[in-house]
Amino acid sequence: MPTSAPWDSLWIDLSVATMDGATMDGMATGGADAYGAVADAAVGIKDGRIAFVGRRADLPDLPEALATEVHSGQGGWMTPGLIDCHTHLVYGGNRAREFEMRLNGATYEEIARAGGGILSTVTATRAAGEEALLAATLPRLDSLLAEGVTTVEVKSGYGLDTETETRMLCVARRLAQVRPVEVRTSFLGAHALPPEFKGDPDGYIDRLCAETLPAIAEAGLADAVDAFCEGIGFSVAQTRRVFETARRLGLPVKLHAEQLSNLGGAKLVAEFGGLSADHIEHLDEDGVAAMAAAGTVAVLLPGAFYALRETRMPPVDLLRRHGVPMALSTDNNPGTSPVCSLLLMLSMGCTFFRLTPAEALAGVTRHAARALGLSDRGVVAPGKRADLAVWRIEHPAELAYAIGLNPCMAVVNGGVARRP
Ligand code: NIG
Ligand code: FE
């Protein structure tokens, strides 16, 4: 085996959807270059990074001379590894009973106001130890990883006290030690009002800003700070206080905004230069313009839209017109989106929200990376992390088209290849 080969590994016999340099125009019209496609391609990897992307015919030497490991893509397609940029993957229990209640006519808001909803998951999560939480989370994570996910964001928000929020985020960090995945964490203490602060939301935000968030930041457990700005969540004024604390601690912000009503949360997160505004079914043009000016990504969550049987769509045309990048994610959570398939979100993003398959793929690659503030991944380009997925497909639109089929044949995490 040659030891002087310039690259550690090389992929050949495949096409590549680089998702690099794809224009919004190209994506919206589904043009041939919307995927940044390279046919008869080769991808070289060195030290966990992409060293070469191009035509196989342009390789400077024979494959065996270029890398110690040569992999065949068997005529399929390579894409960036998928990025699930909005999940609540770590929690105890489930809410199947609430699902039955909703089918019998109760609304999500009614259940929440009656003390169920998020608070029932808070009770189950507070009761679960770290090992139990980890064991409950792994099957959900494994389902995502089998479909080519290489980076996942995980939020806290089912503890609502310093101890349990910390435990949730420790479990989230541990996921990256026990599975081949990169984890980004978001502190979502302002998710719901815990029972011990009933009637005193400002008192809860006081504690969150004075104690919980500083402790989480000090322990290095959060990469970002999120909140639920909604009638059944927290007001714009309360969310602003959370964001001011985040800013003081040097943490970027993102927000569950305009999901059930239009409170102006998107404008607020844009004012703080936030990474993303998520859900946004009720977003108006003022909010879209503010996001465009701030470079805030729109994260669309069709799983929650589907499970809540919503009819109001996020303003996709406005987002396109203002050039706001759109990401797509599972929003995996026990209440509104018990979804463990990111590929299914590509299908729903196209069918419900009228994204093109190329926009949907950009939504789980380069735009999802941006929603997490990560500039080192999400495209197949020299210098980027070698996080890649290889698919048994003839055209990348198949990823959004098929339902319940997983064509993932290989995954590369930081240069290391695995079978899903
Ligand atoms: O993203 N909207 C608030 N948070 C979650 C739902 C959480 C839950 O119901 O447990 C969401 O949809
Ligand atoms: Fe969410």
Image (tube, helix red, strand yellow):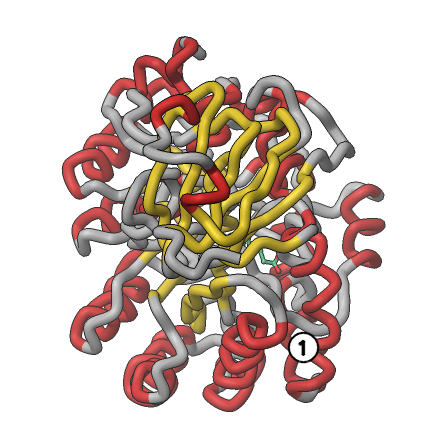
Q: Position of residue 284 (x, y in %)?
A: 32, 30
* Residue reaching furthest to the front: 2
State whether residue 25 is above or below residue 313. above
Q: Position of residue 278 (x, y in %)?
A: 42, 45
**Label 1 packing within 10 angstroms: few (<14), some (14-19), many (20+):** many
The amino acid on which the numbered mark 1 sits, given as a three-letter code, is Leu
Q: Quadrant of residue 211?
A: bottom left
Is residue 350 in view?
yes
The residue sitting at 58% across, 42% down in the picture is 71
The residue sitting at 52% across, 33% down in the picture is 12
Q: Disc 1 designates what residue?
A: 134
Confirm if mark 1 falls within 8 A of ligand 1.
no
Q: Position of residue 42 (x, y in %)?
A: 45, 32
**Image side of residue 24 versus residue 329, left or right:** left
State whether residue 159 is above or below residue 272. below
Q: Closest to the observer: 337 or 400? A: 400
Q: Closest to the observer: 245 or 390? A: 390
Q: Where is residue 110 in the image (x, y as percent from the top left)?
A: 66, 53
Quadrant for ligand 1 reads: bottom right
Q: Closest to the observer: 391 or 280? A: 391
**Image side of residue 151 versus residue 407, left or right:** left
The residue sitting at 43% across, 38% down in the picture is 43
